[in-house]
Amino acid sequence: MDPESPPGPQRRGAVAPCEGTVAPGQEPKWLVRFRRAAHIDFAPRYRPPSKPRLVLATVISVVAALAFDELCVRIAISTYPALHSFSPFHVADYATLTVIGVVAACAAWPFVAVVSSTPRWLFFRAAIVVVLVLWLPDVGLFLAGEALRGVVALMVMHLGISLLTYNALVHVATLRPDLQVVTEPRSLMLAEKTVRRVWSSMAILVAAELVLGITAIVTVPFERPNALLPAKGTVLYAAHGAVGIALGVGAVVVLLLSSVTGRMARIGAVMGAAGVLVGLAGGVCATFQSSRLLGMALMLIGVVAAGVGYMVPSLEAMGKAEAARAAAAREALARSSSPAQPVVGVSTAASRNGASAEEQRDTHPPRH
């Protein structure tokens, strides 16, 4: 379970450079320091786990996490019967959030193997950060008046799920060493096709968040009391919040990746991250009845801004393709409209021969 040592050698030819990229030396200093501290060096020494192993690890993680949740809930209720009415202990609530969180962590494991030369080191510390973030809503429940024992049980559940998921991924979905490594550092930049795929995936998540948000507005009562999860439409609201959290994590990742992309992709990453931040702030405001309308407006503004931002690389590619097609059409039109050029050598020689014969007849008339 111990994380790996600091970064070592780098792999040859991880990604292809694209036009308009920037070298790491041109990155902002704070981003360079953050990447060094987090060991995000884009120099993988391991290949991602195979798909069968990753699926197996995901299934094991989900089953183990749900069993651990049920065990914690039963122990807490049997020890303190008053927690039987504790809303986060409803099966639909914790099971939905657990499945979404575990699947998101399993999907992030191959990605971590690509962006870092020490994936276990980075993944272990990322798991710690995620646990601390998940504890913040638990503390919010305590401050809102919920029982301390129930909040402690939730915190134990979050910690246990993270440990189970981490060990299942590390020991089941094992990484494969990459033998093609070199010791000299090189500047790596994401290919344009990769940028479009990553940014477009974020745009799809934003669209899913918009659909879930509109459905939640229609389904969940507006005049509900202050609560992290409403009594009606709990599963839908939990899915809406889980996708929002995934967007927040993805926005940070895309913002880090933008340091090795073109200018337009960086602009889109910043715009998308700002939109996601505004949307998350709106989600927090929507938890409270007094600021719910403001929160809904902020979420709508944030989703629209994030969607536009993450569509920037695709729109840029469409513009380049359209410009190339227009240039090709103009070139074809110019070739078709130009008159046919005569064969200069033959026509000129023929005219000269004709002129010479005519001159000879004029100068030397034939003799009879």
Image (cartoon, rainbow, N blue to C red):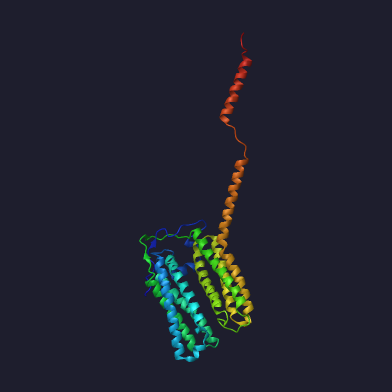
What is the residue that sits farthest to the top in this orientation? 368
- Side (left or right) of 8 relative to 367: left
Q: Quadrant of the C terminus?
A: top right
Q: Quadrant of the N terminus?
A: bottom left
For the question of whether residue 107 can be seen, the reply is: yes
Q: How many marks?
A: 0
How far across and down, in percent of the image, does residue 261 sit?
A: 51, 61
How far across and down, in percent of the image, does residue 129 sit?
A: 46, 76
Query: In the displayed structure, would residue 172 be above or below residue 157?
Result: above
Task: Please give the name of the residue rendered at 39% of the width and 62% of the height, measured from the top-left corner.
Answer: 10
- Side (left or right) of 121 relative to 140: left
How far across and down, in percent of the image, does residue 287 sit?
A: 58, 80
Query: In the displayed structure, would residue 187 be above or below residue 108?
Result: above
Query: In the displayed structure, would residue 20 be above or below residue 344?
Result: below
For the question of whether residue 118 can be seen, the reply is: no
In front here: 337 or 12?
A: 337
